[in-house]
Amino acid sequence: MKPTLSFRSLLRTLTIITALGGMTLQAADPIKIVLVAGTVKEVDRPGHHDYLGGCRLMQALLGQTEGVEAALVTEGWPSDESVFEGAKAIVFYTDGAGKQAYLESPERVAVIEELAAKGTGIVSIHQAVEFPAAFSKQSAEWTGGNYTPLSSRGHWDSKHEIFPDHPVTRGVIPWEINDGWLNRFKFPAGMKGITPLVWSGKEHLGSPEGGPADIVAWTFDRPGGGRSFNFSGLDAHSAWERVGMRTLVINGILWSAGAEIPQGGAKSEADQAMIDSFLTPRIAPEPKKKAPAAPATTSKK
C-alpha cells in the first residue's frame, strides 16, 4: 500500500515550493506609465490643445487594461521627479517648438536622456513631436524624426482606413476627421527603426500613397533599446470621439511600455459623456471685432 501524505507534510511541502518559487507566486508588478500634460491656456475655446483633459482621459482609458498604473503630471513637469522612477513609458502631450517644459533646462533634458537610455518608452503626441533645431539630436533619438523648416502643419480632412500589420494597429478601425496635423518630418536614412502607421496630407489625405512626407503616426525601435510612439494629430479633444484613433493611441502607449497588445486591440471604451467629462474649463476668448465698413465713395461727374 502506497503511503499517503499527511496534511502537515503537505503543508510543509507547499511552503518549501512557495519559498523556492520566490516571486513567481506573487502578482506581477504593475506597468507604470507617466502622463505629462502641458500647460493649458486659460483663455481658449473648449477642447483646443486640452493637454490636461486628454491626459486625464488617457489615464482612465489605460486603467481599463489590467496591471497598468498611470500617473498624471500637470504643467509640463513634475514638482517631484521621483514620479518617473519605475516608469515603463512616459507620454508627452504638450505644446512644441521649444515650449516643452522638459526641454527648459539641461537638467531636465538629462533626466529624459537617462530614462531613454534605460529603455523607457517615449510617447510624443501632437505638438510635442516638434523639437526646435537646438534639440534635433534629442528629437532624432527620442522620436526617430525631426520637424524641420521644410516640414508643414495645418488643418484638413482625412480618412484613415489602411493600416500596416503592427501591434499598435490591432483593433484599429477606420475613422474620418478634420484634425490639426504636422507632417513632412525628416526620418533617418532607409527609415531605419521607423514603422509608419498613419498618413495624412492635403493631396493624398489619409492614403499611404503620400509616402514618408505624409506620415503622421509612427513607431521607432530605438537603436540603443526602447520603443517610441509618435502621433501628430489630436489638436482638439473632440478627436477622442473617434474609436479607431483612441485605440491607436492607447495601443501605442502600451506598446511603448513593452506591454503585449491583444489581437483585438487594448480596451479604450468611452462614450460622449465620459469624453466630455474630462474637458478642462476654459474662458472663452472675446469675439473678434469686425473691421468697420469702408465709407461709400461717390464719383464726380
Image (cartoon, rainbow, N blue to C red):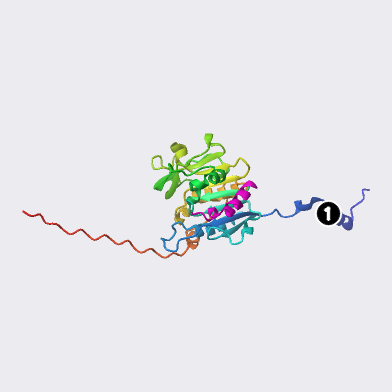
- Of residues 255 and 90, which is closer to you in this image? 90
Mark 1: give few (<14), some (14-19) or many (20+) Cα within 10 Å: few
Q: Where is residue 235 in the image (x, y as percent from the top left)?
A: 45, 53
- Horizontally, residue 259 falls left or right of residue 55, namely right
Q: What residue type is labelled 1?
A: Leu
Residue 85 is drawn in which quadrant? bottom right
- Residue extending farthest to the right is 1
Kindly identify the residue that appears in the image at 61 percent across and 48 percent down: 116
Residue span colored magenta: 99-118
Give the prevailing secondary structure in the magenta stretch: helix
Determine if residue 16 is in view: yes
Q: Position of residue 54 (x, y in %)?
A: 51, 57
Determine if residue 171 is in view: no
- Residue extending farthest to the top is 190
- Of residues 217 and 39, which is closer to you in this image? 39
Whether 107 is among the magenta residues is yes
The answer to whether residue 213 is above or below residue 71 is: above
- Of residues 160 and 123, which is closer to you in this image? 123
Whether 34 is among the magenta residues is no
Q: Position of residue 212 (x, y in %)?
A: 47, 38
- Indicate the secondary structure of the residue bearing disc 1: helix
Q: Where is residue 136 in the image (x, y as percent from the top left)?
A: 52, 44
Kindly identify the residue that appears in the image at 49 percent across and 49 percent down: 245
Q: Mark 1 points at which residue?
A: 14
